[in-house]
Amino acid sequence: MAQPSPIVNLRELRQSCADCALNPLCLPASIGGSDLLRLDQVVKQRMPLERGEILFRENVVHPALFVVRSGSLKTYATLPEGDVQILGFHIAGELVGLEGLSGNGHRCSAEALERSSLCEIPFDLLTDVAAKVPGLQQQLFRVMSREFARELEHPVMMGRKQAMSRLAIFLRSLSDRLRGIGHDPRVLHLSMSRQELANYLGLAIETVSRLFSRMQAMQVLDVDRRSVRIVDPPALAALAEKSDDEA
Amino acid sequence: MAQPSPIVNLRELRQSCADCALNPLCLPASIGGSDLLRLDQVVKQRMPLERGEILFRENVVHPALFVVRSGSLKTYATLPEGDVQILGFHIAGELVGLEGLSGNGHRCSAEALERSSLCEIPFDLLTDVAAKVPGLQQQLFRVMSREFARELEHPVMMGRKQAMSRLAIFLRSLSDRLRGIGHDPRVLHLSMSRQELANYLGLAIETVSRLFSRMQAMQVLDVDRRSVRIVDPPALAALAEKSDDEA
DNA sequence: CGGATACCTTGACGTGCGTCAATTGCGGCG
DNA sequence: CGCCGCAATTGACGCACGTCAAGGTATCCG
């Protein structure tokens, strides 16, 4: 994930949708001048969150859409017994908070993994504007559908019984998403700990650690703590696609 | 899941949203007279699907919302190597097709598990009406958010390392959903095979079979092939909530 | 610079569940 | 009724991954 700039960029905070680099990926896509201004008026630019800060918490009613502008977040659910399940990692251009629009409160919590800036769009204001700007309504549904489709990747990954497959699938997915926002898809800066990654993958932390070591030994990855370089993408793809019964 | 009536009920096919038993759970919730008629006009009532029939297929562009009226479906993704991952089982009152609205085609396929009737709402028509009926737009977002939240249950279940926990979580979830549509939450008629259930849970079919036997022996369930009676709900809850490290 | 701490890695070991294989039971059909 | 075929169950066995434990290494802070 992108390294945050060490100091707060104040100009970044005042940026409008029209200037935003994420424009084509986000709600403004294919929305013109005056309509864009209308949208701009309901978009709240938040102070950056620091690592560990909470964006929203489970069961709290806070119907708003959040768009990650830089940095990264994790979302997670807390189980009755107390332990957590990490549901996703979210990088720039991705939406967070879609599960909290139903009025019954959020079904998961969201926390910054590093210094991250976001846009917040209160849901009631958004629907008002969307009702008046048909293109926006359409685009809103499209991005929601896109996030919905992305959610499906998680259970697909968890369905693999080979641990190596799971990690390979995750790394490829992250690589693809980085490409989508213009980053080098071979260079991954993991913003989550091994513990968090293991939890997301449904594995023990030791297993994840060993997998990184093995993939390094196999010359598929170049791993230095949280910096991962994909040395051999086809090999990684092969690991990701290896079916369970050819082990 | 509800048993389908043995013959096609023609009256059912002509039913309007106003008459539909699912009304409060579905899009019409809190929408009044003339607006409801407008909605009705864009809702297509499909001939019931027979067991095994496909509602939509991966990668096919078919932007429409489907609402299950009776029966049940499964959704699944096909992996490059050929095997599948079942992503969800959907009973009456639940939405299907949300991942296909982005215009890039569906990200999963949907297939009937038994004779099932559905409503189909072409997406472009729906957004037209939603733009004119603010309450509908709101409700549409709410039900989408509800389905989004439901999706999160799957990875939470898959994150459990104990197989028994996974099955217990699934059974409780199904029971809750049945209660939501007015069925007896203790009586489950599974419309999916053990194979399909095992795939959904990320387990081997033999494991699932053994789990049913064990839970029967523990007097938690009463299992007769696909008919499952929850004998001891608190015990089932305890199994579902047992954390991984207290095994 | 030194000590504390959190994070990660590596090794040794045990087990829960996957795999393989055989058996049972039900439903359909001649 | 009796045969067939698929779904489900049950048993035996092995291994991949979880668990426990020790050691290594970067970062922080006094």
Image (tube, coloured by chain):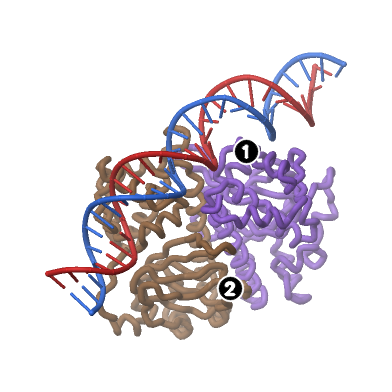
Chain colours: A brown, B purple, C red, D blue
Label 2 sits on a secondary structure element that is: loop
Q: Amino acid at mark 1?
A: Gln
Say whether residue B153 is visible: yes
Q: Amino acid at mark 2?
A: Asn
Label 1 in the same subunit as label 2: no
Does residue A121 sit above or below A205 in this rendering? below
- Left/right placement of residue A20 relative to residue A82 reads left
Say whether residue B106 is visible: no
**Viewer-side residue, A226 vs B1:** A226
Which is in the foreground here, disc 1 or disc 2?
2
Q: Position of residue D29 (x, y in %)?
A: 25, 77
Q: Which residue: 49% across, 37% down?
A: B82
The residue where tag 2 is placed is A59
Q: Which residue: 67% across, 53% down?
A: B90
Q: CA distance from mark 1 to mark 2?
A: 35 Å
Does residue A132 sit above or below A217 in this rendering? below
Q: Position of residue A57 (x, y in %)?
A: 52, 74
- Left/right placement of residue A46 relative to residue B94 reads left
Using the image, tell me which numbered label, if any, was put on residue B195: 1
